Amino acid sequence: MVEQSSEVFIIGPDEPVAAKPSGADPATAETERELAGVLAGVVSAERVPVDSHFFDDLGANSLVMAQFCARVRKRPDLPSASMKDIYRYPTIRSLAAALVAAVPAPVDAPLSASPSVPAPSPIPVPRPSTSRYVLCGTAQLLFFLGYSFFSGLVAARGYEWIAAGSGLVDVYVRSFLFGGLGFIALCGFPIVAKWILVGRWKSREFPVWGLTYLRFWLVKVLLHANPMIFFVGSPLYVLYLRALGARIGGGVTILSRSVPVCTDLLTIGSGTVIRKDSFFLCYRAHSGRIQTGPVTLGRDVFVGEKTVLDIDTAMGDGAQLGHSSALYRGQTVPDGERRHGSPAEPTRVDHVRVAPAACGTPRRAWFGIAGLLQLFFLYLPLAVGGMYMLFAQIPALGRRLDAATPSITSSGFLADALVLSVALFFGFVVLGLVALFTLPRLLGLAIEPDRVYPLYGFQYALHRATTTMTNIKFFAWLFGDSSYVVPYLRGLGYDLSEVEQTGSNFGSEVQHETPLLATVGSGTMIADGLSIVNADFSSTSFRVSRATIGPRNFLGNNIAYPAGGRTGENCLLATKVLVPLDGEVRTGVGLLGSPCFEIPRSVERDSRFDHLRTGGELDRHLAAKNRYNLRTMALFLFLRWLHTLALTAFGLASVSMYGVLGHVVIGAYVPITLTFTALYFVLVERCVARFRPLSPRLCSIYDPYFWWHERLWKVPDHYLNIFNGTPFKNVIWRLLGVRTGRRVFDDGCYLTERTLAAIGDDCTLSAGSKIQCHSQEDGTFKSDRTTLGAGCTLGVGAHVHYGVTMGDGAVLAPDSFLMKGEEVPPLAHWGGNPAVETAAAPAHPDAVGAAAVAATYSAGGDAATAS
């Protein structure tokens, strides 16, 4: 959807397109005329004045200007322009002067120039083999089935052994032994499998879907399924990574749940802190290949929240990387220096903002031991023995083990499943809300704001419990994107005393360190992916502080907002922006990029629906939206309960048939329920969408179409992550309506609007990447199609906006933000936030560049099958 600018000011027919400035050189004057002509073509106007402000005077917006930049880049006679240039130089005259000044002066050729040597042609890269793609998927499926069957066999034998106990004490002892041994086996098996299948990881490269990739995938899946992930933030997690081959010093604190896979390539010096939602995988997917490489962190390093450390990156002793930042391949941070931004650049901001405290090895050891004691003596016996007690004490379950019980087709079976599912599902909803509205406030009484506490103590344990409990995704999913999220967040402890209801104050993905110290001003609207960073950590201490988001703000997607953020009222914080921690408090402006720079808060085009946000119009439309949202919440509560009912019925059926089919039926439970879950929610989404593709749309948030679109966002899709790195992920995407090509490698990409996205053959979509085909800006909703050509690569954590086109073989660097309306040429490398054209990253010694891969696609011929 090309958004025509009907509000752009058009000058009279007698006025020149570009008046030559006094004293301007001919090159600048010519560039002015050409740029003005290009912009006039974009906005369908005859003429555009060269001194008019793009946003204030012409009423253009970022989508219009992105289309202007794309057309300029296609003109070989004009210097290239980016959106950052547009915001820095917002008139044709200033833009032309800046672009001309940035072009290097031509160098006279020597009299006796040597003949030019043509650049070597890219080495043709064979396209991935479809047969190898299918064989890899088959092997992955067989492994999953085998692992499920073996786990079911062990679980069934364990239950039989526990059930043979006599008395409560005997059952507890057996539960303790079986649960403890089972936990040790689940934690130890991935470690053993890694050393057997891989040995030590080394810097190398290999194609996806091959035998080497299969071994890589097996290790990755086992690591992600390891229960040690629940010990993130504990010294035990560091010991686990060491067992996998990582070289980690003492006093290291890791708070990110992003599991490093190639652990032998990870080096972390003592005293280092890695905040949550950070990627340091030691591998990356690039142009249909897996590339592994080292990530090296020195002593006392700080890595902020929502960061990406690409392979072959390093940080020296005492170095810092701020939140919402990235180190690209080959980047290093010298000792004691500070960086922020994507890609990272120097800054003076000190991101370690909490004083150290006494936290020695004994304290860390005791915290780890106490956690294990709780696990082995309390949680595991309750979980394992509790299963036996359920069958022993609940008649509906106990009857299932009796051979004389009626078959699964009887009315008694359905009644048992119905009663049990209602008790489980709605009991969780009611008791969960009661716990969330009471326990965090009680736990918070023991933690004083702005007081420094040592890590791994009583207050740290309470803080971890509060963070885990109040970030349960179910309730944010249920209440988000509606007026009812406000009382929910208030119940958690948010300070929303002056909030102004809009019906879309918060999305369904909001997280925080503690809800008791989060303040959001009146009239502020927040899209999905907000992380309120109201706790600071060093390697020995932590502190909670109030984070305040000012009134009348709008926050885009995927933003980390720290305590002390230097923004005030009436600010626009764009998607993936780096919220500043220094300088004056920004008010009445927009902030874009990492590091951020100022842009207009809004333009006239974005205020076309403002009349719906005040007075009687707001009251009427808000009431209608609230009624619609209530129906949506009721619908999805019913649909999720129906899913719980089906899983409960499958479970009871497995127990009933255990005496006939034995361990096979227990082992088949996980594959059957996973398949059912995927197909069930695919069907739900297609039904909600009425089996029709979405269309590009520009409307108000009070338009019933937007409410229906919000309903689509409610469809659960948590099951998608299970299929990452397998051909089955592409099958699911196609069922959901994505126009996806052949042999796409999806390592964890997320698509918000499936039917508006098109993905070409052999694309590579890295972990944490996102294709978002919509934008909500204050009260305006916009959506459009996004297309990725064949062989494109999205780096780790990359974010692609709506209305974007990437040509064949194009590459988007990690943690980049490709803004709406951008057109990336074939074979181009783009990176940064916002993304601009960059030089290709240095190649691995045995790597074949993305340009070679793209050249193969562009040639259109069939390449030899890779072995």
Image (cartoon, grey):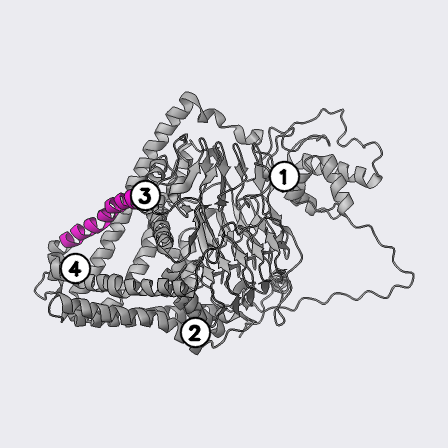
3D distance between C-alphas at marks 2 and 3: 43 Å
What x and y, as percent, mark residue 130?
A: 49, 68
Which of the two discs, 2 and 3, sits closer to the camera?
A: 3
Q: Which residues are magenta?
A: 414-439
Amino acid bearing label 2: Lys
Q: Tag 3: residue type?
A: Arg
Asked if the residue at tag 4 contacts the one at tag 3, i.e. Cβ–Cβ closer than 8 Å, the answer is: no
Q: Where's residue 352, x and y in %? A: 53, 52
Disc 3: which residue: 441
Residue labelled with disc 2: 194
User: What's the mark number on residue 229?
Assistant: none
**Distance Cα–Cα, label 4 vs label 1:** 63 Å
318 relative to 179 in the view: left or right: right
**Badge 4 or badge 2: first in the primary sequence:** 2
- N-terminal of the two: label 2 or label 3? 2
- Look at mark 1 in the image and give the residue it sits on: 65
How packed mark 2 is, by other alpha carbons closer than 10 Å (few <14, some 14-19, many 20 or more), is: many
Instruction: Depth check: give the residue in front, 781 or 778.
Output: 778
What is the distance, in whole Å, between disc 3 and disc 1 at their CAs? Answer: 48 Å
